Each structure stands twice: as C-alpha cells, then as structure tokens.
Image: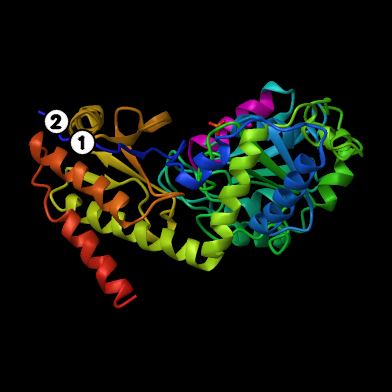
Amino acid sequence: MSVSRGRKVLATPGPTILPDEVLAAMHRQPIDLYGSAMEEITQSCLADLKSVFGTQGSIYIYITNGHGAWEAALTNILSRGDRVLALESGLFATAWADLARALGIEVELLPGDPRRAVDPAALEERLRADREHRIKAILVVQVDTASSVVNDIPAIRAAIDKAGHPALFLVDAIASLATMPFMMDAWRIDVALGAAQKGLMLPPGIAFVAAGPRAKQARQAAGLATRFWDWVFRDGEENYMKHCGTAPEHLIFGLRAALDLLAEEGPAATFRRHQLLADAVREAVSAWSKDGSVEFNIIAPSQRSNAVTTILTNGFDPLELQQWCEAVCGVSLGTGIGSFSGKGFRIAHMGHVNAPSILGVLGAVEAGLTALRIGKASGGVSAASALLGRSIGRG
Ligand SMILES: *Cc1c(COP(=O)(O)O)cnc(C)c1O
C-alpha cells in the first residue's frame, strides 16, 4: 500500500525543489548566443548575484557543479606546491582539500570534528605558528552539507586577523547561500563559491565564483590557471568569453527567474523563513530523540544550520526508513554521506521550501518511524507546527 500519488517532495540537500516560475522560464527556445538579449540577461544576473554574495567584486558563472567551482577558485589563485590550510568540519572541506591535493597543491588539514563547528581559536593558534606565512590560502565551508554544521565565518575571519596572517580566505557558501546571511566584502572573504542546485532553487549545471581584489591580484602569479576556469579570459570584452564559449542559456533564464523570486521575497524574509522552517525540523527531531532512537549529529544547538539537518539513527538502518518514505509517501530524504553512510539521514530545508513541504516531510518521517516500529516516535509533527504557530502568531 502506498499514499505517494500526487506531487513528490524532494528533501535532499541538492538538488532541491524547483519553483514553477524557474521551470516556466526555462521552457522556451534558445536565443542568439551573440545577441544583445543574451548579453543583457547575463549582465543583470551578474549584478544581482553581487548582492546575493554581498560583494562589489567580480562574479564568474561556470557551466559546472560545486566541484568545478572548487577547481575554478583554486586554479585562479595558486601554483603547484603552494600550501593551503583546510578547516575540517565534515565531508565537504576535506573533499575540497582532496581536490586541491590532486592539483598538486600542498594541503594541510586543521583537524576538526564531524559533530562540531570549526574552532576559531585552534585556527588562530595554527596561523600564529606559521611565522614564515607559508600558508597561502584558508579553505572553509559555511555550511557543511554532510554534517549539517554551520561555521561562524566572521569569527574565523577575526581569528585570521588576530594572528595577523595574510592568507587568502576562501569560503564555500554552496549550501548556505540564500538560506542565511553571507557578506563577502564585510567579512573580507577573498573568494566565495555558490552552486545552482541548493538554496538558489535551480537545476544543477551552473556554479558561481566571486573574487575580490586580493584574489584577482593573486591570479597574476597563479601557475595553475587554465583557459576554461581563467578569470582573465572571462573578463574579456566579448560576452561569449564570460562563459568561455556558448552560454548555458536555459540555466541563465532559470537563474533570472530565481533571482527575481529572491528579490521579491527580500533577503531578511528569506533568511527568516529558513530559520523558522529549520526550527520546526529541530522541534520534531527533539521530540523523536526523547527515546534515544534518533539524535542530532550537531551537538551544540547554535551550530545547527538552517539549510539542512543531519539525524543520527541509533540501532536501525536509515536506508530502511528512507526507502519507506520514498515508496509509501513519495518523500525523498537525504542519505547519510561520508562517515554518516548507514548511520544517519538528512532532511534538507533549503531553497523553495514552505510550511506544507517541510511539515509533510516531517509527517512522512514520523509515519515511517511508526510503521517500522522504530522507538516510540510521536509528537514531532505537532511540536513542529506548534512552534510555527507560536513564532509567527498572527503573521
Ligand atoms: C553540494 C555541495 C558541494 C558540491 O557540489 P556538487 O555540485 O555536488 O559538486 C560542495 N560544497 C558544499 C557545501 C555543498 O553543499
């Protein structure tokens, strides 16, 4: 028996649910790649992306995914043998570090814990010890999508400043952009990264790199630069150079629609919506945690992100629950990845999400826990809706 007919709900932390406006904007014929319409729409997207990133710097749109953005960022500022320090806090910073190593970059990990945020004091201490300033760049993620931790980027910036270290500061905001504040210039970030398929509500296929003045300066000595990723080529006169070839036209049409949706809601309301829906998820997980069958991966409540929640399963196989939710309810949960494989699952609450989509996901999980006789899970959904009612009041 199944109750899954009707619109399916995707609760994976990328790709995420697409707004109908984005789908509709993409449902059209291509246009002349060299024409003024293509140039105008590209320029308008670049201008709006600057405000999404909070920067006056340059924005580059790449036909790629998050991994490509990682490579674009590194190759434009570094040379073989340069040293970087990656701040471990889950799978993504270490995967970025592995990619750097494969490029011939010397990588050092600042050891972290998959259940906690990066410790700024440990970073400050490490940087103080680097008296010769051998570390050329620092790599960190704002939200690690595997562990669901949110790192405190301003506190990490302050630690770099306290140590008086000149390293370039690179922040992966792929999972966090448009779900919580991000202020590239105010936080003096040199390179910031985003991708289409998370909070930006687009299909996978494009990713964004924002570069500040110090990063553009570093490009001049970067031995790893190659044509496709190269900021210098992409800064060229002709519009096609911005994409190093044919523009990903339909993704740009979709991007225009997604940026319009974000502008219409306004950043404060977008962030508040994510906060409230994340709080609702956390209420439900707290209720389910009472008998110990599940628990939050991130121990400190202040370090839990508003984009995704990783839930550890104690004594049962998360895949069974995921399969039940998918087959019976039409809800796709995020699978546990990296060290969480077989040990937990994830609920994404990023992008085009609202109360019915999130409460529906929570309801499916609670039904699944009941059906599979896992613990004594109950009361999660009512706790989540009560929280929304209490917090929002008359609206
Ligand atoms: C999804 C994600 C990536 C990787 O993106 P892909 O598109 O899968 O290459 C990198 N960093 C973070 C924080 C992510 O959430």
Q: Residue at x 68, y 61 (%)?
A: 187
Q: Quadrant of residue 75?
A: top right
Figure label count: 2
Q: From the image, which quarter does the N terminus lie in?
A: top left
Q: Single out the residue that lies furthest toward the bottom.
A: 394
Q: Residue 329 got which mark?
A: 1
Q: Is residue 70 visible?
A: no
Is 133 a magenta residue? Answer: no
Question: Disc 2 beta carbon < 8 A from ligand 1?
Answer: no
Mark 1 vs mark 2, CA separation in Å: 7 Å
Instruction: State the SS at label 1.
Output: helix
Q: Could you tell me the amino acid type at mark 2?
A: Ser
Per the rendered image, the range of residues in magenta is: 88-101
Q: From the image, which quarter does the C terminus lie in?
A: bottom left
Is 100 a magenta residue? Answer: yes
Q: Could you tell me the amino acid type at mark 1?
A: Cys
Pick whichever, 216 or 82, lies toward us. Answer: 216
Q: Residue 12 got which mark?
A: none
Q: Residue at x 60, y 52 (%)?
A: 259
Q: Is residue 159 above or below residue 205?
A: below
Relative image position of residue 219 (x, y in whole percent): 86, 39
Pick whichever, 32 or 334, lies toward us. Answer: 32
Query: How was the colour assigned to the protein in this rendering?
Result: rainbow
Q: Are marks 1 and 2 in contact (CB under 8 Å)?
A: yes
Instruction: State the SS at label 2.
Output: loop
Q: Is residue 360 above or below residue 252?
A: below
Mark 2 = which residue?
A: 2
Q: Is residue 16 above or below residue 151?
A: above
